[in-house]
Image: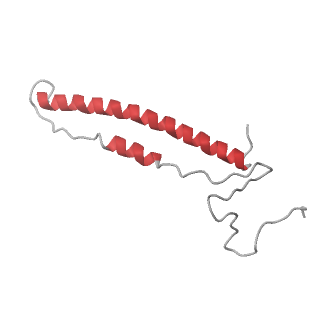
Amino acid sequence: MSDYNVLTDGRDDGALICTSESQKVAFHGATPTSQDATQDDVLSTVVDAVLSTVISTAATSTSPYGYSSAQANAITDVIEDLRSSLDGVVLIVNDMRSTVNAHNDALINKGIIASS
C-alpha cells in the first residue's frame, strides 16, 4: 500500500474543506486563494438575444416576390436585427473565452491542474 495520508472523516457524506468563500485553499504546493466570484449565466444571455429577434411574417401572393412592401421592409429589419444580434453573440463568445481562461487560471492557481 502507498505511503500517504487520507483526508476523510470516514462518513459517506464526504468531507468539506472550507466553510465560506473567503477561506483559502490550495493543492499541490500552490499558494492558497479564496473562492472566485460567481460568473454570469452567459448561455441564457445568448439564448435571450437570439430569441428576442424572432418575428413571423405572413406569406402573400402580391408582387414582387410574394411580399407586400411592408412585409419586405419587415424582413429587411429582421435581417439587420439578426446581424446586430450576431455581433452581440460574438462579444458574448469573447466574454465566455475570457471566463474560461479565468477559470483555467484559477484551477492552476489552486494547484488542481498544472500550467502548460
Residue displayed at 15% across by 36% down? 59
65 in relation to 33, above or below:
above
Question: In the visual, does 16 lie left or right of 83?
Answer: right
Above/below status of 69 relative to 9: above
Q: Residue 90's quadrant in the figure?
A: top left
Q: How is the image coloured?
A: secondary structure
Q: What is the x, y in percent for residue 97?
A: 55, 37
Numbered disc total? 0
Q: Position of residue 7 (x, y in %)?
A: 78, 66
> Among all residues in the image, which is located at the extreme bottom?
11
Q: Quadrant of the C terminus?
A: top right
Q: Quadrant of residue 75?
A: top left
Residue 9 percent location from the top left of the image: 75, 73
| Nearest to the observer: residue 104 or residue 20 | 20
Residue at 39%, 31% (x, y): give it: 87
Q: Residue at x 58, y 42 (%)?
A: 100
**On the picture, is 81 further left or further right than 91?**
left
